[in-house]
Structures are given as C-alpha cells and as structure tokens.
C-alpha cells in the first residue's frame, strides 16, 4: 500500500490559482571559483572570490537571503572559462559574465530581487571552455 503526500502550495493572489511550492529557495546564484594550476584561463584569475563575497553581502544587505528567497553559492568549474568570470542564476538558467561590483549589484538588484534579466551582462551562448 503506498500513499502520496500532497504537494505543498504557495498561496495565490485572490482570483489566481495556487502554485505548487517548487523549491526551498526562490533563486540560486552560483559563482565559478575554479582555479587552474596549469595556468589556463579560469574564473579565479578574475577575482571571482571577491565577486562572490560582494554578492553574498549585497544579497544579505538587501534582505534577500534565507528560505524562500536567494542563496549565493560557490561552484567549481562551470565549463564556461572563455567567458569568465561567470555566474549562473537558477531556476532560470541565466548565465552572466561580470567585470566589477557594479555588475554584481545590477544582478542582485534586478535579477535576484525582481526577476529581471540583466541583458548587458549575458554570457554569449557560444562561449564555452
């Protein structure tokens, strides 16, 4: 005998259908922090750790961190080295290439907070390793 637990739902606005709760966090952003010991191009050579630290602080300062909101994560190689440094936001699967803290601030304020893609920072789709 098997039983299936009901899916939890997120309350909807009046008149709208309730949506199943999909994830513990609304969004995740993963920063590639990979460092290659052989001298090949990698995100670590572009201050990826500092960008990660800045993003984590900015998300916290904006009140966006915690369950149901945003999680900032470290990642190993994301295999987009030629476009580095890179970060990817899920669940949308949007890839960003950034240069400085102002770029990170735009990602936090627009994408992570409002769900708006920062088109000027999109990683070109053909940029791989």
Image: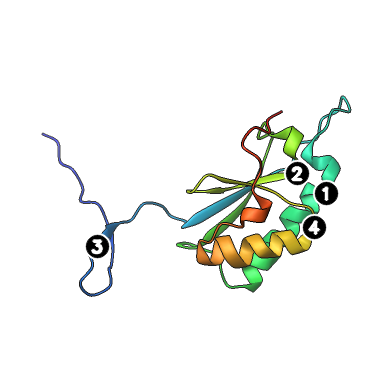
Residue 122 image point, x, y percent: 64, 48
* Sooner in the amino-acid sequence: mark 4 or mark 3: 3
Nearer the observer, disc 4 or disc 1?
Answer: 4
Q: Earlier in the sequence, mark 2 or mark 1?
A: 1
Nearest-to-viewer mark from 4 and 3? 4
Please identify the quadrant where the N terminus is shown: top left
Q: Which residue is mark 4?
A: 100
Q: Quadrant of residue 65?
A: bottom right
Q: Quadrant of the C terminus?
A: top right
Looking at the picture, tell me which residue is in the foreground, 31 or 4. 31
Q: Residue at x 33, y 56 (%)?
A: 21
Tag 1: Cα neighbours inside 10 Å, few (<14), some, or many (≥20)?
A: some
Color encoding of the figure: rainbow
Marks 3 and 1 sit apart, C-alpha to C-alpha, by 42 Å
Q: Which residue is mark 1?
A: 47
Give how far apart the Cα atoms at labels 2 and 1 are. Answer: 8 Å
Where is residue 109? Give x, y as percent.
Answer: 61, 67
Q: Secondary structure at mark 2?
A: loop
Q: Which residue is mark 2?
A: 85
Q: Disc 4 and disc 1: Cα gap in Å?
A: 9 Å
Q: Is residue 65 visible?
A: no
| Residue found at the very far left of the displayed protein | 1
Q: CA distance from mark 4 to mark 3?
A: 39 Å
Distance between mark 2 and mark 3 Cα atoms:
38 Å
Q: Secondary structure at mark 4?
A: loop
Are there few (<14), some (14-19), or many (20+) residues within 10 Å of tag 2? many
Left or right: 64 as drawn, with respect to 104: left
Disc 3 target residue = 18
In this rendered view, identify the residue nearer to me: 56 or 109. 109
Query: Going from the N terminus, do you reach mark 2 or mark 4 first?
Result: 2
Classify mark 1: helix, strand or loop: loop
Residue at left 23%, top 75%?
Answer: 14
């Amino acid at each position: 005998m098997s039983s299936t637990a009901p899916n939890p739902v997120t309350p909807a606005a009046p008149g709208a259908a309730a949506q199943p709760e999909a994830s513990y966090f609304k969004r995740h952003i993963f920063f590639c922090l990979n460092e290659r010991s052989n001298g090949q191009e990698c995100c670590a050579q572009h201050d990826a750790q500092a960008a990660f630290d800045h993003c984590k602080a900015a998300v916290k300062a904006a009140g966006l961190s915690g369950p149901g909101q945003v999680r900032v994560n470290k990642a190993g190689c994301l295999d987009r080295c030629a476009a580095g440094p890179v970060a990817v936001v899920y669940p949308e699967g949007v890839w960003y290439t950034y240069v400085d803290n102002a770029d990170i601030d735009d990602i936090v304020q627009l994408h992570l907070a409002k769900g708006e893609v920062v088109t000027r920072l999109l990683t070109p789709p053909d940029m791989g390793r």
